[in-house]
Amino acid sequence: MLRSIASRLLLELRLFFIALQFFTRVPVPGWVGFKPEWLQACARYFPLVGACVGVVGALVLAAASLAWPPLVAVLLSMAATVWMTGGFHEDGWADTCDGLGGAVSRERALLIMKDSRLGSYGALGLGLMLGLKAAVLTSLLAPVLGELNEAQSSHVHQVLLGWTLMALVWSHTTSRLAPVLLIRLLPYAGDVEHAKAKPLATGVSWGGVLGAVAAWAVVSLALVAWVGHIGWPVPTLWQAMGWATLAVLLGTWWLVRWLRKRLGGYTGDTLGAAQQVTEVLSLLAWLAVVHPVMWVRW
């Protein structure tokens, strides 16, 4: 019995390392090994990999904020996460913009997305996506006009940094759910036999989806426990996570409908695009809660 439990735990650890190796530059121990079917099974750990990326971004942001203004700190944090993932998702977003930005046929779009060269739509999409992320994170860090007079006495800057760090970790975690849902809800649009990650092209079970949701829930509850421990307003965190979850689900639903109509399914590039889109939607929702506009305050 104990041997069976230990074997299962070892397999789960291997699956986490496989997911980490697939999506980041982080080296994994040699004993992990590899089996093709593990790449499909490790989908349940995508959100935990996102949490790891988010934690790295948050640590860099916190350290950089000690020496530099918000925009510089944000750009250094973004650079750290892009380096850690090798620009994996950003590349998928750029390729998706190139393939689906113009009015071309499905077959032509798939060919364009396979081209390693960056086109006009990809350059515009990547620039706008990175710029929007930087703008949202910088806005999260910076006090708005009504808070400026209180910044010195109430430590507004430190509080906003804390909310921004949580937004980074949670958004990176939650945005990794979108690709899992796309794999489950859509067929593979390309040539399965020549797919770079063939096991992922054959789908993910509902058990894998539930596992990913469970991993996401663990990270979410950990943030709630931490906020409660330090005495910050837990209802505000619930509100931020609630609106962000709604934004991610709506964004994923739209992507499913759009990709089914446009390509008849998903590709590896569109999975990366889904992560990028839902990450920025999540951050926008956090910003709306942390810095509500005037009509929301009324």
Image (cartoon, rainbow, N blue to C red):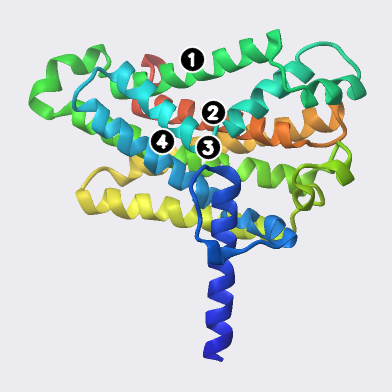
The amino acid beneath tag 3 is Thr
The amino acid beneath tag 2 is Leu
Q: CA distance from mark 1 to mark 3?
A: 18 Å
Position of residue 166 relative to residue 96, above or below, is below
Q: Among all residues in the image, which is located at the extreme bottom?
A: 1
Nearest to viewer (mark 3 / mark 4): 3
Q: Nearer the viewer, residue 192 or 281?
A: 192
- The residue singled out by tag 4 in the image is 168
Q: Is residue 298 visible?
A: no
Residue 85: which disc? 3
Query: Is disc 2 surrounded by few (<14), some (14 to 19) or many (20+) residues within 10 Å?
Result: many
Q: CA distance from mark 4 to mark 1?
A: 16 Å
Position of residue 262 relative to residue 5, above or below, is above
Q: Secondary structure at mark 3?
A: helix
The amino acid beneath tag 1 is Gly
Q: N-terminal of the two: label 1 or label 2?
A: 1
- The residue singled out by tag 1 in the image is 131
Cβ–Cβ below 8 Å for labels 4 and 1? Answer: no
Q: N-terminal of the two: label 4 or label 2?
A: 4
Residue 281: which disc? 2
Q: N-terminal of the two: label 3 or label 4?
A: 3
Residue 73: percent from the left, percent from the top?
A: 31, 23
